[in-house]
Image (cartoon, rainbow, N blue to C red):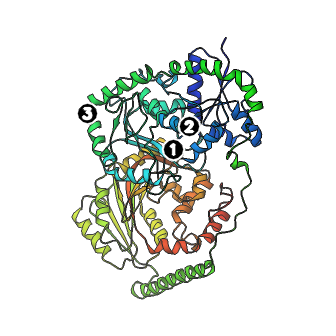
Amino acid sequence: MTAPVHVFVARTGNGFMRDIAEWVAEAAVVAGWKATVVDDRLPEADGTINLVVAPHEFFELFDASPRRLQRAAAASVCICTEQPDTSWFHLSLDACRRGLLSLDINEHGLAELRAAGVTAERLPLGAVPSMTARAGEAAETARARPIDVLFMGGLDQRRSRILADLAPRLTSHRCELRLFRFERPVTASTPGLVFGADKFELLSRSRVLLNLHRERSGRMPDGSAPPPYFEWARMIEACANGCVVLTEPSYGHQPLEAGTHFVEAAITEIGDVLDELLADESRITALRTAARDAVTGPLWLPHSISPLLRRIESDVVPLLPDHVENSAPTRGLWRLGASKIPPAERLGAFRPYQALQSTAKRLALEESRSLRRLDSAACVLRHGSTQHIERTATRAYEGARADVSVVVTLYNYADVVVATLESLLASSDIGFEIVIVEDRSTDASRDVVRAFMDAHPDVPMLLVAKEVNEGLAAARNTGFEHARAPLVMVVDADNFVTRRCLRTLADALCADSAADAAYGILEEFGGESGLRSALAWDPEQLCRANYIDAQAMIRREAWERLGGYRDDDDHVFGWEDWDLWLRIAASGGHAAFVPEILGRYRVQRGSMIALTNLATDEALDALELRYPTLPWPESRPG
């Protein structure tokens, strides 16, 4: 008769850790043990085998006194899942020191535990039956795997820069970038993420999983970096579902071998290797077969976990009652539980010039309004009205029937607007018209657009040229007023769209009839590289900061229902797109997110952004008052 196995995991922790806990319990059951996943109580020295997955989460998030947590850790066999030289690993170490035995899924982590004086063994991860449920359901063809490249991981600056640099390659393939931020635990309810069977299904539809390492740990000395860590959990689930892994070089992957079970490439070469791999289906097939055979054969988790459980049952469990009572488990460093300590009361951000900045913003906006009044007066003298608009259309515009109207707002971008329009003309598989709203530029923008229209008479284009500048929000509203299609794509005159952007976003709105808008990921270029609009729709995240750019496709009906872009409030000057997203959220609506790179965003410091940020506190207060039902954070970062 074997001892029961309890696999503990934090109820409110990251879903990735629950996945691993489920695998361990499933493997134990397949191997003949009675195993269950537990998340509502602490381990005890009661004759059971207590396995704690991700102790840095379980003991941190469980609501109990430090003494109870320390005694529970002493009665446990901790399974460490984190990279050494991270804060999470060091928190795990505090718990591991209490127990008689700990396990780690990576050789490097195992070595660090032993170096710290912890008795530890390796838990070689492998596949379990639930991972491979779909393995034989479809023929292994490119058609059965419509996603060429899949990336799943936390979004930090390093990964953001690398993915942006790879954008020209990624946009030539069918890709999905499932990104999130580690600001709070990610669970099955986190928008855009998948776990368990849903993740296996996604992997089974993907040809290549791209694996990029996280940023250097903040615990490392300056100028140094942690050894590249092999992400075993990510590797196993990909291999079990026939998704080939392309990764940066890593340590601790034995018995899996680079070139046989997965592909390894330096970051400077990973783009070329990715293209070569996707072009070689026979190599993908060989790698897929070898990897799946390894994780379902020699690395089959039920095979490796059973001897570990027998050792724990015979050598550890009998010693636990005396160990918990007499080993003084409450002694030594214990940093877990800090999240349960009331945080120190924070003073407001130190902004000694806040009043002066607010005054400066008010004066600058008033100056802008004064100039517009002068322009309006001049317009009255010339045209008899406070605003005069000239409309110029190509010969193809009058009879065009478009699926999408593209609104391009233009102010002093004569040097780049042609490149933007050319990117739109390259759009494929969709009928579109382009409405350019020229907002009284002081450069040659208007003439440049007219010349472009003359050169492309067969493209439905309309130039709406204003005699008086009215600002970006008003310009966008003017574009919507002239748009004839039910779907409107908003594009600034210095940005770009990919060839598939319009078709992909229109398809997303067709698939989600309740969505008011749709957006995809943008590659930042120019002053810096990175990703923008890279996270799924999440009102809680949206209340922390505007992470969705204005470059999106919006239903014209939704724009009308919501009242368009707000152009009558100084507080949201420069934040009009954020205000619109918040208005959608407050009305119970949402925007559909397409997790692939569909455009490019030019990074530059503009006067509008500088002016907007002069009085952010006032603007945030105004937004909270306007949308009180949204989940605003209790405090703002200083």
Q: Amino acid at mark 3?
A: Asp
Give percent across and percent down for residue 622: 64, 68
Label 1 residue SS: loop
Residue shown at 49% from the left, 55% from the top: 221
Q: Amino acid at mark 2?
A: Leu
Q: Nearer the viewer, residue 194 or 99?
A: 99
Q: Which residue is mark 3?
A: 280
Q: Which residue is mark 2?
A: 113
Image height of 540 relative to 450, above or below: above
**Residues at marks 2 and 1 touching, judged by CB atoms closer than 8 Å:** no
Quadrant of image for the N terminus: top right
Distance of label 3 from label 2 (alpha carbons): 41 Å
Of the image marks 3 and 2, the number of the one nearer the N terminus:
2
Of the image marks 1 and 3, the number of the one nearer the N terminus:
3
Q: Is residue 436 something that shows in the picture?
A: yes
Q: Nearer the viewer, residue 254 or 340?
A: 254
